[in-house]
Amino acid sequence: MKINVKNRELKTVRRYLYEKGLKHSLKRHTIAELFFREDKHLSVEELYDMVKKIDPDISFSTVYRALRLLEKAGFAVSRRFMDGVKRFEPVHPKEHHDHLICIKCGKIIEFKSKKIEKLQKEIAGKYNFELLSYRLELYGYCEDCKKHR
């Protein structure tokens, strides 16, 4: 099964690999293509399970190394939420978002808030603090889990 996703991220990854003198294999391409297409928080195991359906010959370590390479290159960021599982998500420059994480089922909901963005800048300014980045993670129960509590 072939994935057909043409996007800027893949071209940028190819250019990065070329500039660094790294191999651009079909396996790496398949992993990156699926990772960017899914565009969500994925553990190595989750991405590996998806990739195996497309190319059964891809190993777990190949998926892991590809994700680490994407992270090192700045195309992915890894996060460990309360469950301790390392998940990777594509980086979208100039698009900041925060997370609501369900502590029962692990569902991750991304959200954006201009109010929060403004407030954090105000707080940093109040303390004459040069803010470079921040991360907001809110833990609780998603709608479905809340119903079954």
Image (cartoon, grey):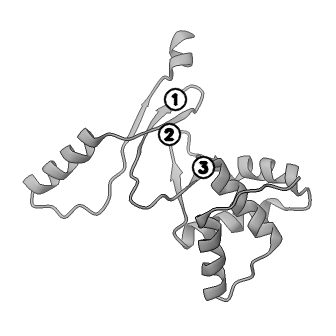
Q: Residue at x 37, y 50 (%)?
A: 135
Amino acid type indicated by mark 3: Asp
Q: Position of residue 8 (x, y in %)?
A: 59, 66
The mark found on residue 82 in the picture is: 2
Left or right of residue 127: residue 141: right
Q: Position of residue 142 (x, y in %)?
A: 50, 23
Numbered circles on residues, count: 3
Amino acid type indicated by mark 1: Ile
Q: Which residue is mark 3?
A: 39
Mark 2 secondary-structure assignment: loop
Q: Position of residue 98 (x, y in %)?
A: 40, 43
Does 11 appear above or below 34? Answer: below
Left or right of residue 131: residue 69: right
Mark 3 / mark 2, whichever is N-terminal: 3
Mark 2 / mark 1, whichever is N-terminal: 2
* Image depth: mark 3 or mark 1 in front: 3
CA–CA distance in space, label 3 to label 1: 22 Å
Can residue 148 be seen in the rendering of this structure? yes
Does 143 appear above or below 125? Answer: above
Q: Which residue is mark 1?
A: 103
Mark 1 secondary-structure assignment: loop
> Are discs 2 and 1 less than 8 Å apart at CB?
yes
Q: Residue at x 50, y 39 (%)?
A: 82
Amino acid type indicated by mark 2: Met
Mark 3 secondary-structure assignment: loop
Q: Residues within 10 Å of mark 1 (few under 14, many from 20)?
A: some
Q: Toward which corner of the image does residue 125 lie, by quadrant? A: bottom left
Left or right of residue 143: residue 53: right
> Are discs 3 and 1 less than 8 Å apart at CB?
no
The mark found on residue 13 in the picture is: none
Q: Residue at x 59, y 51 (%)?
A: 86
Mark 3 / mark 1, whichever is N-terminal: 3
